[in-house]
Amino acid sequence: MKSIPHTTRRALVASVLTAILASPAFAQTTSEVEALREQIRLLDQKLRVLERNIEIKDETAAADAKKLPKLTASEGRFEITSADGTSSLRLRGLVQADGRFYLDNSDAAQDGFLLRRARLIFEGKFSDRFSYVIQPEFAGSAVSILDANLNTAITPEFNILAGRFKTPVGLEQLQSDPVAFFNERSVATNLAPNRDVGVQFHGLVLNKTLSYQAAVTNGQIDGGNSPADSLNNEGDLTYSGRLFATPFVNDKDSALQGLGFGVGGATGNYRGSFSNLGSATASANPLLNAYRTDGQQTFFRYRSASSLAPTNGVPTVNNTTIADGTSYVVSPQAYFYSGPVGILAEYFYTGSDVSIGTGASLNARTLNNKAFNLSVGYVLTGEDAGFKGVTPKTSFNPSAGTWGAFEVVTRFAGVDIDDNAFVDPAGAPTSLANANNSATKVTTYGVGVNWYLSKTVRFGLDYFNNKFDLAPGGKPAPTATSGGNKALLDDEKVLIGRFQVSF
Amino acid sequence: MKIKSLIAALAAVALTGAAFAKPVELLNVSYDPTRELYVEYNAAFAKYWKAKTGDDVTVKQSHGGSGKQARSVIDGLPADVVTLALAGDIDAIAKNARILPAEWQKSFPHNSSPYTSTIVFLVRKGNPKVITDWNDVVRPGVSVITPNPKTSGGARWNYLAAWEYGKRKGGSDTAGKDFVEKLFKNVPVLDSGARGATTTFVQRGIGDVLLAWENEAYLAIKEFGADKFEIVTPSLSILAEPPVAVVQKVVKKHGTAEVAKAYLEYLYSDEGQDIAGKNFYRPVSETAAAKYASQFGSVKLFTIDEAFGGWGKAQATHFDDGGTFDQIYLKK
């Protein structure tokens, strides 16, 4: 077939197209296309608007979400934090269920179980400047407030703490109880003042290598919490302070990064008192504490008459020892933590003016008591030991083959009571303490194991041997009814087990 | 004697400490379209302050819809300075948070507005919907992009400019309201801020016209190209006076009162005014205004005081809960 020439073909196509474009049918098609195009444009706009509205809604929701308070609920942390992170309320808790079993001593306290601590702790902050703690204790015969204080951070280096808080003296006393090596603090802590009411200035200085605390408080006798009433004598206040250095804390490569050492101390003026003397309701407020063993048995107490009622019509105060002047405590202290190893050591030296009797029967002395504590721990599973405790790498989960963390601990501690406490002066006065129911020295050996089942659950099993030295002539009576302290008849050998939840 | 020595030693330490340069940080809470302006200005001020005092100053920025930003400051956002879209938002901070004085606007020249701006139209290249003035944006079938007046300062300027145009055309506030009602019938999307509205129009391709801050419109042209958009200057618009203020209670707490005041004062300097002009704001200094006059279109401007009796009255009438915007938009 003969082909059409190129020029002819072009002319033919042009003619056909012209004819088509000029036809009414094509005009109709073009307007339809335009209409369809407009329709598509409008649909496209609607789709874009829908997409944008969804986008804006999501952006708004995300922005609004940032303004909502944040609720954190995980193992070990229950906290509500404001959107900007400056205010928070954290709920913490501590439950310690103990079992105490006294070995080879039929005269010791009764074996059994007890709720040692049951605390709900509310802590939080308002802005980054103000923080607070409220800590009620539910264990025991009555609910009490252990801590209730407000901290104001003027600067990171200068804070003011007001309310009820731990007096800044003893190292182990200042350590949080749930993370201490042993289920009970050492006997040395008997000489460390505990919680008190007042105001404290504290902070971290020198690039956070030195912490300082200086407190002015109502006052308290060693080893005890302050009572509701002031212990001060004639308005005097108790002054306490502590300096603690961690010179290598910022040097991550240093083997001494976990070294800390310092000294704490306190001094106050205390005077016990009697009331209603001469009547049947006479009573004493001696402002003196008894000292306890690891097994929580009393190994030392000052004389305290069971009754101050007049004898043959004559008032008597001769059988009760009271605080009677200045009291002070000094405590050099140190810790060292490196990898799984932890060591805590402290020493106490106290001076206390105490007296018994009046007039010619007065026996007033300054007693100098001493105490020490050396505790060592080793985490068998390799976690780091620390002053703030051990965080297990795994939790107890036999099906997953994980067992948590294990730590072995040991302790050597003691308290040496001034022998003058047991001296019977010539004449009518009597000794400040009764050698038959108080030891002049206690030496403690302890071993234990801590099983960290999770970040919050710990089981601890400790064994303590408290060896008592009695003052010359001291003869603990075989039974309590004879007036002696039967706990001193033999060394205290006690097994203390504890299940603890702390978050 | 010992006490005297101690005081002398402490004074010596204090004086020695003062001799060292110290880092200073400010938070400037601003509105959406000022991002580029303050990036350039903050760098210039830091250089100036370093030369003057030896101190390194870092200015952190926070941007968003002006109303939302004011709300955040009221709710506790610790702004050292606020540079918002309209005086009403700073008035709200003064009234509700009481962290700056009620007469804050007297602190700096020109009612504390170091630069001004106005509202113009950004349309697609070729102006396919033939939009030349406010009348055209209320035509049926014209899709208009403007942010939400409840949260955006720019949107409130847009709203008031449209209202005044309608009012002048119809001769009454009722006419102004009808005009704005028609306009909002053409608004398919309400962004919370001016920058979001620009995104809707420019990047998402929605709408035929964007009611925009003048500087925002010019920046869009500069960034996305004159081959895509063009600016239409209406016959009448409003003189927008974005104000600035030091948040007194915050700077007192932060110890930044001196540097915060200097930061805002420097906006009035030759360099500050030049930076404002370069970023398409209308400088208040005569020299800088003359230098940048040619880059802006010719428009008849009215002030909010003339037309609405000031921001307090305008806010209460139009934008507070139950105001004319609620009446119009809730009906829509």
Image (spheres, rainbow, N blue to C red):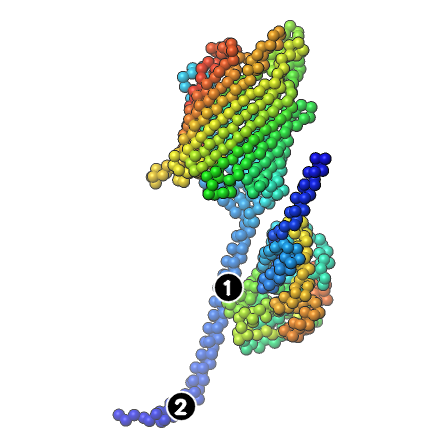
Residue B320: % across, % down:
65, 58
Whole-number angstrom distance, CA of label 2 to CA of label 1: 47 Å
Residue indicated by mark 1: A52
- Whether residue A87 is visible here, answered yes or no, is yes
Residue position marked by numbered label 2 in the rendering: A14
Examine the image and state in which quarter residue B303 appears. bottom right
Within 10 angstroms of label 1, few (less than 14), some, or many (20 or more) residues?
A: many
Q: In which quarter of the image is the N terminus of chain B?
A: top right
Which of A278 and A258 lies nearest the eye of the viewer?
A258
Q: Where is residue B14 in the image (x, y as percent from the top left)?
A: 67, 45
In the rendered image, residue A310, in percent from the top left (x then y), is placed at: 64, 9
* Extreme residue in the top direction: A312
Q: Residue at x 53, y 44 (%)?
A: A80
Quadrant of the rendered image containing residue A396: top left
Q: Is A249 located above or below residue B125 in the figure? A: above
Quadrant location of the C terminus of chain B? bottom right
Amino acid at dot 2: Ala
Residues at marks 2 and 1 on the same chain: yes
In the rendered structure, the answer to whether residue A437 lies left or right of residue B233 reads left
**Residue B185 percent coordinates (x, y):** 58, 68
Q: Earlier in the sequence, mark 2 or mark 1?
A: 2
Residue A332 drawn above or below residue B57: above
Label 2, residues with CA under 10 Å away: few <14, some 14-19, many ≥20: few
**Dot 2 lies on which element?**
helix
- Circle 1 sits in a helix, a strand or a loop, which is it? helix
Residue at x 48% of width, y 39% of height: A257
Q: Can residue B323 be seen in this view?
A: no
Residue type (three-letter) at the residue carrying disc 1: Arg
Residue A272 lies in quadrant: top right
Q: Which residue is drawn at 62% across and 23% down?
A: A327
